[in-house]
Amino acid sequence: MMDGSMYSILAYYHIGTIENPGEEVARHKEFFKTRDFRGRIYISEQGINGQASGLTTDASVYQEWLEERFGTISFKVSLSQEHVFEKMTVKYRKQLVALDREVDLSLRGESLSAEQWKEMLERRGEETVVLDVRNDYEWKVGHFEGAELPQMETFREFPAYVQALKERNKSVVMMYCTGGIRCEFYSALLKEEGFEQVYQLDGGVIGYGLQEGAAHWRGKLFVFDDRLVIPVGDSPALPIASCHHCNEPHDVYYNCANMDCNDLFICCVPCLHDFQGCCCSSCQQGRLRPYQENPKPFRKKGKIPR
């Protein structure tokens, strides 16, 4: 419920050794006990990855508290009149980014500012490949012009994709993700595999939108919170995806109301009502969650992407 308070939405990460991540999890939980915060924060031996919304005063205190112990952190900050997460979750995660292999993070690609990224996009040649290292459902609702989505079931297959990329005579690799953390790991892997010119978008698409707007971006940005999709920059964008049922332009995802399905699909409001929140007519039979006019995706257990 909105009460006039303003909330800061934070997206950030810190790459660096944390010798006892369990203690850091406990320290975070204690910090949030008396503060108005919600979100998801994952902590491992590799560092911290966080997305959270907090009362603006509490968010400022948290940023200062974190930087006092870990040094300067690039926080991407936007404002909202309400929380965009249901609850506060802080937990240990062995891998901040799923690769199932160790990489030498000292070999990370060269970071480009939003301005440098825009300039490089405008003058790239045939030797350059622009990689979107997000999931396919993220890419579907928005991506940079000319960006390539690696074809794979999960990003644990990325090492195999890199081997195939070597055969395509692409000497320059530009990669981007939502907030920047995936590129830290994937760019290091590319460097380990012999790619010399590897560049990553500093701050990810979130940071780019705050600085350069929607230049060379198509569609919107998928986010893992109640906002579902957001514009990149201040200008609204037309959907580049379409409703699963009627094919009308649309870009909001829902989880199927059939609890034995729970598949993720794009749906417009009229079709969502007609199918009572289901992805197909057959799913309207069985164990169904009660239909809501304004359902909140990503709050149900099941096939919820991360």
Image (cartoon, rainbow, N blue to C red):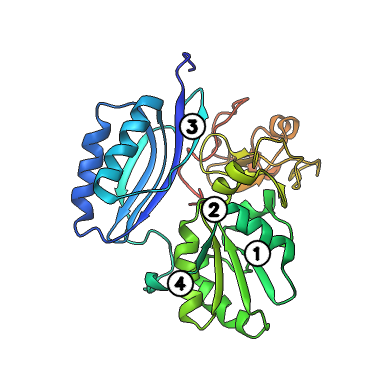
Q: Earlier in the sequence, mark 4 or mark 3?
A: 3
Q: Which mark is residue 182?
A: none
Q: Are marks 1 and 4 in contact (CB under 8 Å)?
A: no
Task: Determine whether the residue tagged by mark 2 lies in a helix, strand or loop.
Answer: helix
Distance in Å between CA atoms under marks 2 and 1: 16 Å
Task: Determine whether the residue tagged by mark 1 lies in a helix, strand or loop.
Answer: loop
Q: Which mark is residue 149?
A: 1
Residue 206, given in percent of the width and then of the height, sits at 56, 46
Distance in Å between CA atoms under marks 4 and 3: 32 Å
Q: Quadrant location of residue 119?
A: bottom right
Distance in Å between CA atoms under marks 4 and 2: 16 Å
Q: Tell me the crowding category of disc 1: few under 14, some 14 to 19, or many 20 or more residues within 10 angstroms, Cα based.
A: some
Residue hosting label 2: 204
Callout 3 amino acid: Val
Query: Going by the image, does 172 lie left or right of 99?
Result: right
Q: Quadrant location of residue 128?
A: bottom right
Q: Tell me the crowding category of disc 3: few under 14, some 14 to 19, or many 20 or more residues within 10 angstroms, Cα based.
A: many
Q: Is residue 261 visible?
A: no
Q: Is residue 59 above or below residue 196?
A: above
Q: Are marks 4 and 3 in contact (CB under 8 Å)?
A: no
